[in-house]
Image: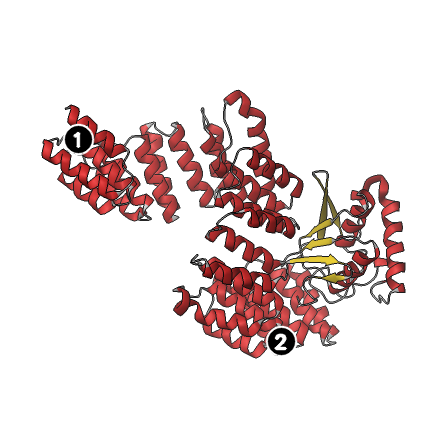
């Protein structure tokens, strides 16, 4: 008996499969064949990811207990075979052993991995009947499943009904908000957790911090992101690759690519996640050569890229006009890296070709790949946008027709078509597009921009200065002064920042009096609200127009400040009269 206990202790501490196998042999030799011994062996094999060996042991058991079933199920989930875990669960329901809360939680985790919401709901209903749903482990698993299935309100109901909450349940709910474009709610919930954590004796883990940082990135809250970063460093989580990747993403999305690079350079041996995050970040700022250098360095270090990494490489080529290099990477994905191009890769290449004016090639590729759903929406939108620039109404008409078939973002398609007509002087056709939009009750999303000052976001809409509060007159006077100084340098844009909008997707459309564009208002407010030399970061929900892009270049030189704009598609970093995009966007 003492011998068996010693072997089991060695089994628990085993760090390699050889130790597990030798312990297994010793236990067999001693004649120990109890359910408990089998469970220890199954767990040991599962920890070393030797699930077939664990299953073989399981099959040798006369009557497996609930621990046996649950351990093997968890093993299959861990090695990315959730369907096998659920097969075991369904078989178990007809056997003597009854599922416990850990079994149900494992089954729910399997549903989450498979994105099988219907089965997850069925198991959830069974848990309610059995009375185990109130268990904190079960509820946390349900939270995670509903969050990953985009059913955030269902996740919140589970969270609100929980009698006891642990750091996992709080983290899962925050993550559910962050992953479903509800960053403000994620940050509000984290604030609630932070205020209550001392009384609950709970400490945020790296998983929660990565979700909080992702939420900051999604809503452009640099101040809160920096505070989270400080807490991460204090708790020693900055070396975690998932957290580091989230920080790189956050700083880049909040207009601070230099800090993103500092986070990356602080990592001793970057793995896939940090490399990919930094490649994508540099690409969004138009730093294509930096992205490609990072990719080459990554390969040289023996880090194998995944499909997201290669999508970042294609984005880098796209935003910098490196078309032939981009095509080279697309065509070598399968042979060099063993990754088949997905629709997202093809959509990026279509956009790359279209931006470069190679519309016939882009059009042909669009027809060849036969994209559907969101991929088709992205692909044909790229084509339509380029048709305006290069005045190709033949392709624009087909692209507009394709986009009009979708039940969402129809307004964007109509506006792009109108702009394409305006670009070639067909104002009557453009007017018909706007009339059709009016007839169908289709409204374009209003342009807005915001600037964060002392952790408060000030949102400006086109022509509206009310967000400036008592400083409205000061704001307008500054914009007029900047307009005057820009004209001294040869600027010929809209007078005083007012006037008729051009043919960009960014604002309301040709012939509509839209006033000062939202990004200029946000910039002006940032300038009057911060000391000289401070970087101004502006976020915009739509594409920045060419007129404002030219104005921001000049203003950056006039006020001697770095200006960063995050628009719908990318980042623009203005310094000394130049932009990192080099006017290619």
| Of pointers 1 and 2, the one earlier in the residue sequence | 1
Judged from the image, the secondary structure of the residue bearing numbered disc 1 is: helix
Q: Residues within 10 Å of mark 2 (few under 14, many from 20)?
A: some
Task: From this view, report whether residue 323 is shown above or below residue 102.
Answer: below
Q: Position of residue 379 (x, y in %)?
A: 54, 66
- Name above or below for residue 432 compared with residue 96: below
Task: Using the image as rendered, state which of residue 478 and residue 371 is in the foreground.
Answer: 478
| Residue 62 is at least partly visible in this image | no
Q: Which residue is mark 2?
A: 357
Tell me the SS state at disc 2: loop
Name the residue located 78 percent from the left edge and 46 percent from the top edge: 526
Q: Residue furthest top?
A: 199
| Quadrant of the rendered image containing residue 506 | bottom right
Q: Is residue 488 left or right of residue 378?
A: right
Q: Quadrant of residue 505?
A: bottom right
Q: Residue at the spot x=76%, y=49% of the render?
A: 522
Query: On the rendered structure, is 442 left or right of 484?
Result: left
Residue 453 coordinates in the image, percent (x, y): 73, 41
In the rendered image, which quarter is residue 515 located in? bottom right
Write the residue at 49% across / 72% down.
328
Q: Residue at x 89, y 50 (%)?
A: 477
**12 is higher (above) or lower (below) than 213:** above
- Residue 484: x and y in percent read 90, 59
The residue carrying mark 1 is 35
* One can see residue 167 in this view: yes
Question: Can you say which quadrant of the picture contains the N terminus?
Answer: top left
Residue 231 lies left or right of residue 42; in this view the side is right
Q: Residues within 10 Å of mark 1 (few under 14, many from 20)?
A: some
Relative to 89, 473 lies left or right:
right
């Amino acid at each position: 008996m003492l011998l068996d206990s010693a072997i089991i202790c060695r089994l628990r501490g085993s760090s390699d499969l050889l130790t597990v196998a030798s312990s297994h042999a010793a236990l067999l030799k001693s004649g120990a064949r109890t359910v408990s011994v089998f469970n220890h062996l199954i767990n040991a094999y599962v920890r070393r990811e030797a699930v077939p060996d664990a299953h073989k042991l399981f099959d040798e058991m006369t009557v497996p207990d609930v621990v046996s079933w649950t351990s093997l199920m968890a093993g299959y989930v861990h090695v990315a075979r959730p369907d096998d875990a659920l097969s075991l669960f369904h078989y178990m329901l007809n056997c003597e052993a009854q599922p416990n809360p850990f079994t149900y939680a494992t089954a729910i985790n399997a549903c989450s991995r498979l994105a099988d919401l219907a089965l997850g709901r069925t198991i959830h209903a069974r848990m309610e009947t059995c009375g185990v749903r109130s268990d904190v482990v079960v509820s946390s698993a349900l939270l995670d499943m509903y969050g990953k299935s985009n059913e955030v309100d269902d996740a919140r109901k589970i969270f609100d009904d929980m009698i006891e909450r642990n750091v996992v349940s709080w983290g899962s709910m925050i993550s559910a908000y962050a992953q479903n474009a509800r960053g403000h709610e994620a940050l509000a919930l984290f604030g609630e957790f932070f205020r209550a954590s001392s009384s609950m004796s709970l400490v945020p883990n790296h998983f929660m911090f990565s979700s909080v940082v992702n939420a900051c990135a999604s809503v452009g809250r640099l101040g809160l992101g920096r505070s989270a970063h400080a807490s991460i460093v204090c708790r020693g989580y900055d070396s975690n690759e998932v957290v580091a990747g989230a920080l790189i993403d956050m700083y880049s999305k909040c207009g601070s690519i230099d800090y993103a690079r500092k986070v990356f350079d602080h990592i001793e041996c970057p793995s896939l996640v940090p490399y990919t995050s930094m490649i994508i970040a540099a690409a969004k700022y138009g730093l294509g050569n930096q992205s490609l250098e990072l990719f080459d360095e990554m390969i040289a270090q023996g880090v194998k890229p995944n499909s997201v990494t290669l999508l970042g490489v294609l984005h880098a080529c796209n935003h910098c006009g490196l078309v032939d290099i981009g095509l080279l990477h697309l065509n070598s994905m399968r042979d060099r890296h063993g990754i088949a191009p997905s629709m997202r890769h093809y959509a990026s290449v279509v956009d790359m070709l279209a931006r470069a004016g190679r519309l016939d090639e882009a059009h042909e590729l669009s027809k060849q790949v036969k994209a559907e759903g969101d991929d088709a929406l992205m692909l044909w939108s790229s084509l339509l946008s380029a048709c305006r620039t290069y005045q190709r109404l033949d392709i624009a008409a087909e692209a507009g027709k394709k986009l009009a078939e979708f039940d969402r973002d129809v307004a964007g398609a109509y506006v792009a078509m109108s702009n394409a007509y305006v670009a070639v002087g067909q104002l009557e056709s453009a007017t018909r597009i706007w009339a059709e939009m009016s007839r169908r009750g289709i409204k374009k999303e209003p342009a807005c921009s915001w600037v964060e000052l002392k952790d408060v976001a000030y949102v400006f809409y086109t022509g509206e200065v009310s967000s400036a509060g008592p400083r409205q007159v000061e704001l307008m006077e500054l914009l007029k002064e900047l307009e005057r100084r820009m004209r001294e340098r040869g600027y010929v844009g809209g007078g005083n920042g007012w006037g008729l909008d051009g043919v960009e997707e960014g604002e309301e459309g040709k012939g509509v009096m839209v006033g000062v564009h939202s990004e200029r208002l946000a910039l002006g407010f940032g300038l009057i609200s911060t000391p000289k030399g401070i970087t101004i970061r502006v976020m915009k929900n739509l594409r920045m127009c060419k007129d404002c892009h030219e104005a921001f270049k000049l203003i950056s030189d006039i006020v001697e400040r770095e200006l960063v704009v995050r628009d719908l598609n990318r980042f623009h970093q203005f310094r000394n009269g130049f932009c990192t995009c080099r006017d290619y966007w």
